[in-house]
Amino acid sequence: MISRQLIEAIGKQYRLPWDGVHGIGHWARVRENGLRIAATLPGVNSEVVELFAVFHDARRTNEGIDTGHGRRGAKLAESLRGVFFELSDEEFALLDMACRYHTDGRTDGDVTVQTCWDADRLDLGRVGMRPDPQHLCTAAARDPDLMAWADSRARQRIVPQFATEEWFGS
């Protein structure tokens, strides 16, 4: 779903360091977190989860508070839809909602959107915060083993191997 060409297109407009707290390592861990959650829940659209991982922070202008970056990420996804990836209107509406509201602390909504939000929240360790189970949407994300696994990877700022191999061809 996520091609090297899509990553290159996102990278051309990305303003922050690739290795920053909102950069490629974060995107890759969010993808892994989301796919792990999706594997345990019926009805989750894994394509939307994967695309959320690369778009939700793709239009940030700084590493701190950046109101509106989720909306801008959704607009970027809209501009690349049909060129680098295909989603139905219904699927794109889920991606749009997940990106737009991922920093609002919401826990309600479609299970795909909830999975996206949980995948991002499970990576808070990269900025020294521990995910709070009360702010996670799904029971799958609240699983202590998954939380510990994701938090450890986030705190170590591990960049999953697929990101360097598939996304960058290294």
Image: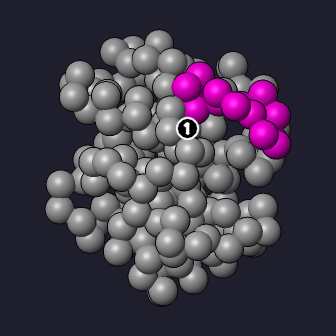
Inspect this view and state whether residue 48 appears: yes
Q: Does 118 sit left or right of 1 as displayed?
A: right
Question: Residue 72 magenta-drawn?
Answer: yes
| Element marked by disc 1 | loop
Identified at 59% across, 45% down, the residue is 103
Q: Quadrant of residue 71?
A: top right
| Residue range (magenta) | 60-73
Inspect this view and state whether residue 158 appears: no
Q: State the residue in front, 101 or 165.
A: 101
Q: State the residue in front, 149 or 117.
A: 117
Could you tell me residue 63's position as x and y percent? 81, 41
155 over 13 or under it: above or below: below
Could you tell me residue 151's position as x and y percent? 63, 74
Identified at 47% across, 13% down, the residue is 79
168 over 105 or under it: above or below: above
Residue position for label 1: 56
Q: State the residue in front, 74 or 5.
A: 74
Identified at 47% across, 66% down, the residue is 136
Could you tell me residue 25's position as x and y percent? 67, 53
Q: Quadrant of residue 38?
A: bottom left
Could you tell me residue 73's position as x and y percent? 56, 27
Residue type, mark 1 in image: His
